[in-house]
Amino acid sequence: MTATHPALAKGDTVPALPTYSAAYQPQGVDERGLWMEMDEAERAMRDSIAVINDPKLIQYVREVVCRTVGEDRCRTVRVYIVRDASFNASMAPNGMMLVNTGLLLRARDEAELASVLGHEFAHFELRHSLTGFKQRRTAGDIFAWAGVAAMGAYRYGGTGAYQAMRTAQSVQIGAVRSVYSNSREQERQADLLSMAYLRTSPYDPHCFSRIWNRLMDEADATAHGRKQRSTRYDRVSFFATHPTDLERASYLRTIADGMNKTGEDDADRYRTALAPWRSQMLADQIKLNDFEGTDYLLKGLAGDIWTAPLLYARGELYRTRGNPRDLIAAASFYRAAISQDPANAEAYRGMGLAQMRSRDPGAVETLNTYLKMKPDAPDRAMISTLLQ
Amino acid sequence: MLRGLYALVLVFGLLLSCAEPAASQEKSGTKEGFVLKEKSAKILLIRPTIKVGAQSTGGMFEPNADWTVQAKENLGAALAVAQGKLGNEVIVAEEPIGAAAAKMADYRALFSVLADSVIRYQFFPGNRLPSKKRKGVFDWTMGPGVADIATGTGADYALFIFTEDQYGSTGRKILQLFAAMAYVSVKSGEHAGYAGLVDLRTGDLVWLNADQAMGGDVRTPEGAQKRIGQLLEDFPGSVPKPGSAKTAAK
């Protein structure tokens, strides 16, 4: 992939982009083995029902990748859009990139999507899967040998046996710790390289840190809604695979400020490209049963302008929680959605069900309207029994 | 202090895998009352799942592309040879394209879940369901929709094969030696596999043979033949070879 890449140490500034040579073949037993496994996984991904097979959307996401990392690098990337409501994306060592619909829903504009995809490409360019695999293997070997040393000390050691066993246990814990701290270090390196991509791209480099701030707020909303404690972002936990969102937001912001670069965010183009899929992504998000997190997300997506799909989604969210006040609120959201988009049959369905639960006599008329608008509704039989 | 010592011993003992009881390594099951008459059926061979790699000192799976390719070639050739001994017509499933590919992938995945369930909940001790422990019970199905993967082939049964090999690395063998000196048994290498037959009309699993310690080095042609022989052992209606070399690794 790369002729040389600079060794990224902690605290390094953003590296210069290394030269890139395409048509790379894997070298060494481990890399070839990993590529083979990933080729099998890609085969499964290609045939999977969880993948969205919309050529226009895939092409759009590929174009975003190309604008971020450059035409040379993006030529062999294959993008698969996975129907998964969580915020995530990944890139396999053989060039397969997975993008979750949860990421597509949470990114506000093209620049934010570009920064995350650039981060994933950075993992790929720096060959983190391979180095991570090797590091985990070494840590596992040390773990096993320490275990044997401890057993040997137990069997054959005299007075020093207990001390030797405790030392071996510390070595084991150190080996486990190294796996996670290595993962965090890889994430940091990928963040730095992705800022290098953003520097040469048409995008605004501040977009990357904005995402992490919003994710922290969303996580706080989720925790509040579930009556749990919020995550502490000032400390790194033992098993953390990534630096904390706060740390990332901070150093990415510092780097972006230091870059002195302005850029576009192409929010309109992003919204247009994702419009056909937004309803499905919102429905998947509501199914996560995360009331406050979803409400926070919806408010953020709306801003000052509540469009019909967002109003409908908010109605669904409130109706599915179903407290008495929620049902009244849901009915009003559905009504607003209908006033903007009278052709939305599902909104009538939602409103009718919310009214029925609230013992509102207008429910019958609303549900009849739904059945009239959608004669081939899959739940026609059930709705009809409600109207008897 | 001694109690703490025993606790630590327990921890280290658990961390190094224990040997499995020699009795329960291989088991097969047939649906009650199922009989496959000789030369009576057409069997569709679904693309086998073959995975070969090494096992690191710490027990991690290390994939190996060359070995897997060799194994796929050798096992494919050995299966072709073994077809004649099955006593029925065997057709190899073609790779579908488009929506049919998604369906095939779904059913292959479903079969692997089904086989894992049979192995875990019926065959081998550890977590067996009481209703499955009774003698002669073998009541598993994939549902009648599985017939969709065989449209146009005219097949009556589908044959699924899975085999995974992890050859212990040198470090693993040395660890085994040192662990043995400390009276801890460490297993080097994993060679597991199963073969199953599904009735395409009803979706019922009519036969499954699972072996958690298989023989035969699949990287060589002779080893692959031995492996296929073990996988298809007790295949219903198979032509018994007089004085055939029954595999010793049972």
Image: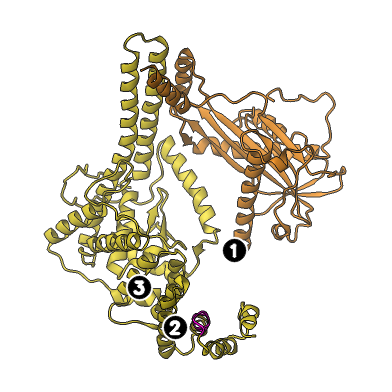
Are marks 3 and 2 in one subunit? yes
Task: State which chain disc 2 sits on.
Answer: A
* Chain letter, disc 1 residue: B
State which chain is coloured yellow: A
The reply, left or right, for residue A182 in relation to residue A79 is: left
Q: Main secondary structure of the magenta part?
A: helix
Residue with the mark numbered 3:
A298
Magenta-tinted stretch: A352-359
Circle 2 or circle 1, nearest the eye: 2
Residue sitting at x 24%, y 61%: A213
Name the foreground residue: A237 vs A386. Answer: A386
Label 3 to label 2: alpha-carbon separation: 17 Å
Which numbered disc, 3 or 2, marks the residue closer to the eye? 2
CB-based contact (under 8 Å), mark 3 and mark 2: no
Disc 2 to disc 1, C-alpha distance: 42 Å
Say which residue label 1 marks.
B98
Where is residue A66? Give x, y as percent.
33, 63
- Judge from the rendering whether residue B202 lies leftward or rightward of residue A84; answer left or right: right
Mark 2 on the same chain as mark 1: no
Under mark 2, the amino acid is: Ala
| Residue A83 seen in render | yes
Position of B86 compared to A3: left or right? Answer: right
Q: On the image, which quarter does residue A59 sit in?
A: bottom left
Q: Where is residue A31 in the image (x, y as percent from the top left)?
A: 41, 40
The amino acid at mark 3 is Leu
Q: Does the magenta stretch include residue A348?
A: no
